[in-house]
Image (cartoon, helix red, strand yellow):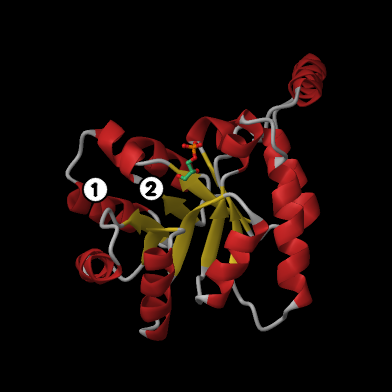
């Protein structure tokens, strides 16, 4: 399972990249606005920090304008992945970009039928927003399971499931059990994956017992 960092915070991204656990990055207009940074400059820095796909989202809503923005974004770095919203214009742009050999991440997915449309349009990634669905009382992880089953029914569909709007380690556990290809995690959720009190307790006990031996390995 690939881990992407869902952030536009270059310091947080760089820190996590140093762990060797980061396979890509996803940004969105809200995350970029929160960073206060120049969009293109920031994407360039992120593409340097992480060599995997870096999702940069278009802000146009008409297909032709999306393609013009995509050309600008693709010119920043070879690992830029163009992100488009799940609209008819977004799907038209996806098909055009896929035909050019560009990777596209189709975002704001909330239904299995939407995911099927994105795959038919040639998306490299589909981003179902599990946390936002949960927030409404819907079953976010149920959507991931549906998309997994649908995509597996049709081997010619090559779109990877990129679980987005992740809120907890439990979303990651369930996504991995279902067989999602990628999850994009806020930095604090990624960091929390390693936490378990018995690990901390066990290590403390090992080290305390070792110290009693008076030995050192080096
Ligand atoms: O960046 C895409 C998605 O992960 C954002 O989800 O709900 O945290 O804004 P959310």
Element marked by disc 1: helix
Q: Residues within 10 Å of mark 1 (few under 14, many from 20)?
A: some
Which sits earlier in the primary sequence, circle 1 or circle 2? 2
Tell me: residue 7, above or below residue 199: below
- Residue ID at (27%, 65%): 66
Tell me: residue 11, above or below residue 46: above
Left or right: 201 in relation to 166: right
- Residue ID at (55%, 61%): 126
Q: Is mark 2 within 8 Å of ligand 1?
A: yes
Q: Is mark 1 within 8 Å of ligand 1?
A: no
Q: Which quarter of the rendered picture does the N terminus lie within?
A: bottom right
Confirm whether residue 214 shows in the render. no
Tell me: residue 157, above or below residue 109: below
Confirm whether residue 22 shows in the render. yes
Q: Which quarter of the rendered picture does the C terminus lie within?
A: top right
Q: CA distance from mark 1 to mark 2?
A: 10 Å
Left or right: 101 in relation to 144: left
Residue 85: horizontal and vertical position, in percent? 41, 56
The circle drawn on residue 27 is 2
Tell me: residue 71, above or below residue 85: below
- Residue ID at (69%, 30%): 137
Residue furthest front in the image: 88
Q: Which residue is mark 1?
A: 42
Element marked by disc 2: loop
Left or right: 96 in relation to 67: right
Instruction: Kindly indicate whether the residue at mark 2 contacts the one at mark 1 (C-beta within 8 angstroms).
Output: yes
Residue 45: horizontal and vertical position, in percent? 26, 51
**Disc 1 vs disc 2: which is toward the camera?**
2
- Residue ID at (27%, 67%): 70
Residue 116: horizontal and vertical position, in percent? 62, 68
């Amino acid at each position: 399972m690939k881990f992407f960092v869902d952030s536009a915070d270059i310091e947080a991204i760089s820190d996590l990249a140093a762990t060797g656990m980061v396979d890509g990055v996803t940004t969105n207009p809200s995350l970029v606005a929160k960073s206060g940074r120049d969009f293109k400059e920031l994407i360039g820095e992120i593409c340097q920090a992480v060599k995997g796909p870096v999702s940069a989202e278009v802000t146009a809503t008409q297909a032709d304008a999306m393609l013009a923005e995509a050309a600008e974004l693709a010119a920043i770095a070879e690992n830029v992945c163009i992100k488009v919203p799940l609209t008819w214009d977004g799907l038209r742009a996806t098909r055009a970009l896929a035909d050019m050999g560009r990777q596209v991440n189709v975002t704001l997915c909330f239904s299995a039928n939407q995911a099927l449309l994105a795959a038919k349009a040639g998306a490299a990634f589909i981003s179902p927003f599990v946390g936002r669905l949960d927030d409404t009382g819907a079953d976010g992880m149920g959507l991931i399971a549906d998309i997994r089953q649908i995509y597996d029914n049709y081997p010619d569909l090559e779109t990877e499931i990129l679980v987005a709007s992740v809120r907890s380690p439990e979303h990651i556990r369930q996504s991995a059990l279902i067989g999602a290809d990628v999850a994009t995690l806020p930095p604090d959720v990624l960091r929390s994956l390693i936490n378990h009190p018995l690990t901390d307790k066990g290590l403390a006990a090992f080290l305390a017992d070792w110290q009693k031996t008076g030995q050192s390995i080096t």
